[in-house]
Image (cartoon, coloured by chain):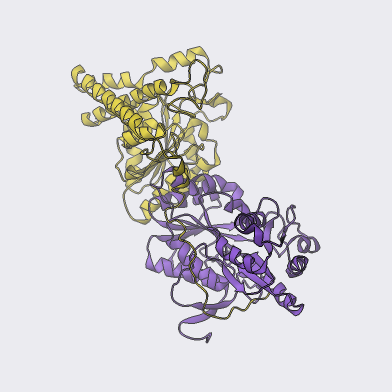
Amino acid sequence: MVPVNDLQEMYRDMVTARHYEERLQEEYLEGKQPAFDISAGPIPGELHLAAGQEAAAAGVCQHLRDDDTVTAPHRPHHVAIAKGVDLDRMTAEIFGRQTGLGKGKGGHMHLFDPEVHFACSGIIAEGCPPAVGAGLAAKKRNEDSVAVAYLGEGAIDQGAFLESLNFAAVFDLPVVFVIEDNDWAISMPKERVTDVENGAKRADGFEMPGARVDADDAVEIYEVAGEAIGRARDRNGPTVLEVQVHRRMGHFMGDPQTYRPEEDQEAAAERDSIERLERDLRNHGVDDERIEEIREAAHERVEAAIEWAKEQPKPDPSDAHEDMFVNPPSGVTDSEPDFEFAGGDD
Amino acid sequence: MSENSAETRELTMSRAMVSAIAHEMRENDEVFYMGEDVADYGGIFDSTEGLREEFGYDRVMDVPISETAYLGAAVGAAQEGMRPIAELMFVDFFGVAMDQIYNQMAKNTYMSGGNVSVPMVLTAAVGGTYNDAAQHSQTLYGTFAHIPGLKIVVPSTAYEAKGLMHNAIRDDDPVLYLFHKRLMGIGWLPAPDGPKTPVPETDYTIPFGSADVKRTGDDVTVVTLGLHVHRALSAAEDLAEEGIDAEVVDLRSLVPLDTDTIVESVEKTGNLVVVDEDYRSYGVTGEIVASVADEALAALDSVERVALPDVPIPYSRPMENEVVPDAEDIAAAVQRTQ
């Protein structure tokens, strides 16, 4: 039985993420119509939205503490929200503002919030090794924190993922690898890139447990993730978890999705993990009024973050030269050796 | 100074490097070393000899042949506040793990607006002169120095090896520590005389961005690093007999680069020879010449570059000797400036 409070928090995170993506889509398209120019508008550059994948974020991150580490890939917003990343500063970052998480230097694929141990990387599967490193640090320090590496199903053929599985397994590290299977690696369906239907089977080759959740059912994900994270926290090693999700939008904003059958898009739109969780909430005795209250609060939170972000100052052009190093080179110091130098080659 | 005094002893470069690592590991539980064959073997190039015996397998970790995993794990552990040292056995192996080096280790501080630090050291063996051919002989100084976000240090002697390592471990930024195999003092790879120097027992740091004038001279400035500091000094001795007085500047770090010391020397000598064991094009020699030209073009009477021609490093001895600059090549370049 899932604690009803956890269900409500998961619902809050999922509707926050969904509304966030829908609102970012609107903001993103500003200045990009009728002619689509990716560098125009208040949010320039690529934008990878995660609508339809919220259950994978909420069901796993509900088990995590602030000192647990999460690395996410290029499609990070839903995971960041579920992990508790500062929504105002994350939004300011996406809008390229000075007060953003990275002072406007990172953008939406490179969000870092050390307060809640969250980072993401735009390179497929390359967030896995740093997550393994966070697990290694926890083990060395004898702490019970864990690390979770998110990746898409298109990333499971990358060496970085496979090397990370081996490393985590051989050192028994507290790491959970979460594969979000949204069926599509940009335009490539899973069956055309791997003969392994169930990505969690990748775990078998490393003698570690693997599990797959076939439906984007937040409750089931919560239960299966709970076991995996509990195992990690109890120092019983890593797990691979694959979760079926649905990509309701294109790979990135502007993706015409001409490669994707219409019925697949329609099916993704129909299978809604948020509606499913609403039914679960009702079954747990949460009434419609309460559900609506959570939803409204989430929407307000998103609107406030977007409003705040848009009011933030843009970076000064000269800020581009800052933050190269934490310890800036201190300049030249005389440190002559106090002995006669004996040079010469052989 | 007595070599046997309590405060100072003469060490090979590898012993000096290890003594700094051991000191930092004693002082700070968060420092650990990861690499291939670093525990029981002690590092193929003696970079960790004796550390496992003192600190055990947890802090001197042999890892799978899996550079992406363990270099990336070092990035992750560093971001959690630990101070990992990860070793790439040969710098030439960078290709199998470059994303972790240049997209994570080098960029995470900047991309996070300075909110994330990556206090790790990446050590790697560099250099040729022993017929190990194209995939095991490079220095790749320019490749890494080109990438913003990495501090790059290159010790030339035991004294530098210890002082730079203390600083590298204590620095809060990612540092690449590139040690030349020929300088380490390994039994099966004899070093020249120069790198074995007196080394203080105590800890001391050599700040990054502080080049060292290894030999003073009035006629020409020879700027170099690593093994070629010794080859340049050897050339300078020969040139002295001809009446040419060369000043030899050891860069010690490529990032940050101590342009001031180079410019000061060139303003005195008027002639600049840059010697590098990396490829000629788009590399250290071009960068040093351009930096001096930016600041002191009028002081430059002549410029020479001595580097590897733009070919992969060949195996057979006559051909490797042809492409890796030696003291005669350096002396010839200096003579052309006179």
For chain A, the rendered hue is yellow
Q: Residue at x 42, y 66 (%)?
A: B25
Residue A250 vs residue B1, the one in the foreground: B1
On the image, which quarter does residue A300 sit in?
top left
Q: Work out which residue is located at the far right of the displayed protein and give it.
A: B318
On the image, which quarter does residue B154 sit in?
bottom right
- x and y percentages locating residue A17 in the rendered image: 34, 27
On the image, which quarter does residue A63 sit in?
top left
In the picture, which chain is purple? B
Location of the N terminus of chain A (image quadrant): top left
Q: Does residue B137 show up?
A: no
Q: Residue at x 73, y 56 (%)?
A: B313
Horizontal side of residue B29 vs A265, given as left or right: left
- x and y percentages locating residue B272 in the rendered image: 68, 63
Q: Does residue A22 show up?
A: yes
Horizontal side of residue B336 vs B152, given as left or right: right
Q: Is residue A130 above or below residue B127?
A: above
Q: Residue at x 48, y 35 (%)?
A: A201
Q: Work out which residue is located at the far front of the displayed protein and give it.
A: B298
- x and y percentages locating residue B190 in the rendered image: 66, 73
Residue B331 vs residue A316, the one in the foreground: A316
Instruction: Give the mark count.
Output: 0
- x and y percentages locating residue A53 in the rendered image: 40, 26
Location of the C terminus of chain A (image quadrant): bottom right
